[in-house]
Image: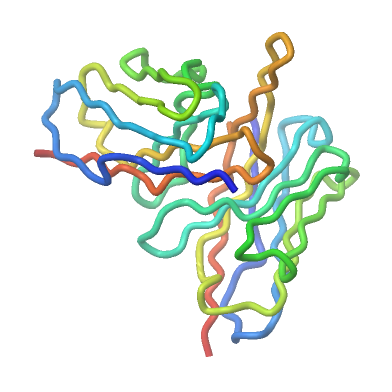
């Protein structure tokens, strides 16, 4: 099975900061990597698919990069509505494993 | 408007069974693979099971394999999860999710673009 890890597990940041979250797969998954945002009490929301494609309606301050085993989600200028937990997910294998999540909170 | 509405959750004793349903609307249900994802209280997302558009391909997480069965009825636009031999560690909010694919060249990238609001399953004596 493909295992997903994320770092950091949590971070504190201020509005306007540039934030980078890293996701690593236990084996190469090409660009089969998605990113989701989840706010408390809400279902996850798709941000990025295929490692770097921005989902329709998602602000352009979100971007994704990487291929193989190492991926990043970048928020170029953190906004108040971006405080949430972020998950990566691989779609290379049938078992669509998620990473453990990265919680972004207010410094 | 795409809608996914889960139902069937509740309080159940360990070892008993429960059947979850997900009613889909606003899209052509039999064009898409569907999945179940769960989230234990205060924890992260865990993929549980997925099924292709025609039920020809099915997968399960190791944690539920042999106990849970995913199925779908395309005529009823519905997805199901039969959960047997429930354990305390199955306690979670269960989401259903729709999975389209972005095809470019020979690559087919899948992702979950719509999620339901979830149905809570609590396994406790």
Asked where in the image residue B52 lies, by quadrant, the reply is top right
- A70 and A42: which is toward the camera: A70
Q: Could you tell me how many numbered marks the image carries? A: 0
At horizontal 48% and vertical 58% (from top left) the residue drawn is: B39
Place residue B80 in its image quadrant: bottom right
Q: Is residue B117 above or below residue A51?
A: below
**Is residue B85 rendered to the left or right of residue B94?**
right
Q: Position of residue A102 (x, y in %)?
A: 31, 42
Is B23 positioned to the left or the right of A47 in the image?
A: right
Residue A93, given in percent of the width and then of the height, sits at 65, 38
Residue B5 position within the rendered picture, expressed as x and y whole percent measured from the top left: 64, 50
Front residue of A26/A88: it is A26
Between residues B113 and B2, which one lies in front from this camera angle?
Answer: B113
Q: Nearer the viewer, residue A6 or B80?
A: A6
> Looking at the rendering, in which quadrant would you find the N terminus of chain B?
top right
Q: Residue at x 14, y 23 (%)?
A: A17
**Which residue, as the protein is rendered here, is positioned at the far bottom?**
B125
Please state the horizontal and vertical placement of residue A75, each as a whole percent of the image: 28, 22
Whether residue A79 is situated above or below residue B60 in the rendered picture: above
x 69%, y 63%: residue:
B20
Q: Residue furthest front?
A: A27
Task: Tell me if residue A41 comes above or below residue A46 in the rendering.
Answer: below
């Amino acid at each position: 099975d493909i295992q997903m890890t994320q770092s950091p597990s949590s971070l504190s940041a201020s509005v306007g900061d540039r934030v980078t979250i890293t996701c690593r797969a236990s084996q190469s998954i090409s660009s089969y990597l998605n990113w989701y945002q989840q706010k408390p009490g809400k279902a996850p929301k798709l941000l990025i698919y295929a490692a770097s494609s921005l989902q329709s309606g998602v602000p352009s301050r979100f971007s994704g990069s990487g291929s193989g085993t190492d991926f990043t989600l970048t928020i170029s200028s953190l906004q108040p509505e971006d405080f949430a937990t972020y998950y990566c997910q691989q779609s290379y294998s049938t078992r669509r494993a998620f990473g453990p999540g990265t919680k972004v909170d207010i410094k | 408007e795409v809608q996914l509405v889960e139902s069937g959750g509740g309080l159940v004793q360990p070892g008993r069974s429960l059947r979850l349903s997900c009613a889909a609307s606003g899209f052509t249900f039999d064009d898409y693979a569907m999945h179940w994802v769960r989230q234990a209280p205060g924890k992260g997302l865990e993929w549980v099971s997925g099924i292709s558009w025609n039920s020809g391909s099915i997968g399960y997480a190791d944690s539920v394999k042999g106990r849970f069965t995913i199925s779908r009825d395309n005529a009823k636009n519905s997805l199901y999860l039969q959960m047997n031999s429930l354990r305390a560690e199955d306690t979670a909010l269960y989401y259903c999710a729709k999975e389209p694919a972005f095809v470019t060249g020979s690559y087919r990238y899948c992702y979950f673009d719509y999620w339901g609001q979830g149905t809570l399953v609590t396994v406790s004596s």
